[in-house]
Image (cartoon, rainbow, N blue to C red):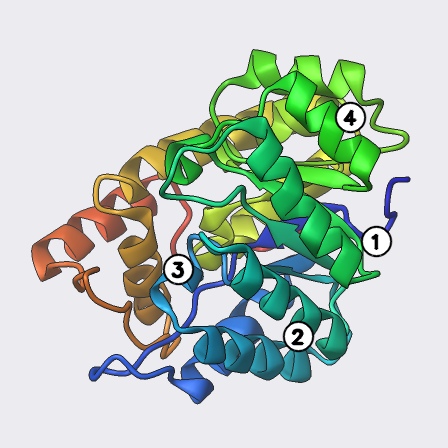
């Protein structure tokens, strides 16, 4: 079934670290507070959240910290995927104990796996928890793309939806056509396809830009909800221009820098990600100001 509360703009929320690389608790709270007025939900410990750069205990801590801070005010999805099944199951059980709304699992990454291995991996998670499980389909990172047949098999096992992070929009539409969105939750994983995906029936967008420009994405989502197609198209075009600016550097490190520019102590990324150079920050800010995205826009 589709989960009605999983809809709209979800932030793959950054994890804040201090200069020494330790999780910075107050920085995590600052980030959440900055985004809360604009987003419809949070996706914790994904690619922007640098979950794969944290230990199992750190991931548990970050989830507990963020879940406690938002205190049920927004739906929360956590990515629990690891290359190994036993640690994925451990994180899934912990997520259920915290009380998240859904658990996202990337196919076991790094090694290439056949469908039987991937199905067994997901079956182990599904056997361990009652919380709804989504597949985090990010083929360029997982090294294990999920084709339509495998997605259908995962749905038969009990997976209830997908976070699809790829620019292959025709593939997304084919999957939506074969797994009707009335019964299966579809989340697009890039702001570049926000308008197109939601217009075709996707329920939500998990967008890295929600970390740095959440006010702009809230305007775009509201235009879609109101059926103002002309305004939505214009805002989507601005979104794509902003995306190109932000991704001149790694989008993750740009997000930290742009939060700092807006007065948010977001801490630092964790190595091997380096802090954005000052000349690059100034260039991004200048170009985003020319688009009218900084300072913050009024939502109406």
Return the disc, 3 or 2, that comes first in the chain's sequence.
3
Q: Which mark is residue 201?
A: 4
Could you say where residue 162 lies in the image, as x and y percent from the top left? Answer: 67, 37
Q: Quick check: can you spot residue 277?
A: yes
Could you say where residue 250 lies in the image, as x and y percent from the top left? Answer: 26, 47
Q: Quadrant of residue 195?
A: top right
Q: Quadrant of residue 288?
A: top left
Return the disc, 1 or 4, that comes first in the chain's sequence.
1
Label 1, label 3: how far apart the Cα atoms are: 27 Å
Q: Which mark is residue 200?
A: none
Q: Can you identify the residue that label 3 sits on?
A: 52
Q: Are marks 2 and 1 in contact (CB under 8 Å)?
A: no
Would residue 45 be found to the left or right of residue 263 on screen?
right
Q: Can you identify the residue that label 2 sits on?
A: 94
**Circle 3 sits in a helix, a strand or a loop, which is it?**
helix
Q: Can you identify the residue that label 1 sits on?
A: 5
User: What residue occupies the far bottom of the structure in this picture?
Assistant: 26
The mark lying in front, picked from 2 and 1, is 2
């Amino acid at each position: 079934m589709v989960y009605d509360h999983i809809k709209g703009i979800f932030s793959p929320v950054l994890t804040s670290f201090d200069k020494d690389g330790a999780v910075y608790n107050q920085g995590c709270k600052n980030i959440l507070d900055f985004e809360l007025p604009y987003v419809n939900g949070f996706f914790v410990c994904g690619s922007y959240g640098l979950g794969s750069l944290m230990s199992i205990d750190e991931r548990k801590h970050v989830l507990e910290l963020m879940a406690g801070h938002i205190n049920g005010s927004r739906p929360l999805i956590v990515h629990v995927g690891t290359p190994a099944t036993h640690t994925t199951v451990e994180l899934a059980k912990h997520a259920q104990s915290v009380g998240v709304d859904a658990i996202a699992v990337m196919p076991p990454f790094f090694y290439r796996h056949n469908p039987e291995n991937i199905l067994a991996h997901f079956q182990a998670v599904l056997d361990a928890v009652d919380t709804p499980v989504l597949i985090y389909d990010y083929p360029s990172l997982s090294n294990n793309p999920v084709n339509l047949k495998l997605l259908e098999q995962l749905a038969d096992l009990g997976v209830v939806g997908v976070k699809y992070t790829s620019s292959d929009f025709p593939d997304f539409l084919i999957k939506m056509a074969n797994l009707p969105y009335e019964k299966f939750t579809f989340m697009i994983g890039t702001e570049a396809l926000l308008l197109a995906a939601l217009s075709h029936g996707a329920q939500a967008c998990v967008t890295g830009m929600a970390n740095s420009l959440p006010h702009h994405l809230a305007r775009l989502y509201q235009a879609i909800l109101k059926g103002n197609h002309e305004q939505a198209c214009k805002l989507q075009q601005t979104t794509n221009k902003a995306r190109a600016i932000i991704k001149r550097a790694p989008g993750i490190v740009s997000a930290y820098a742009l939060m700092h520019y807006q007065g948010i102590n977001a801490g630092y990324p964790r190595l091997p990600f380096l802090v954005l150079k000052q000349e690059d920050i100034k260039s991004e800010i200048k170009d985003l100001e020319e688009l009218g995205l900084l300072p913050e826009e009024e939502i109406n």
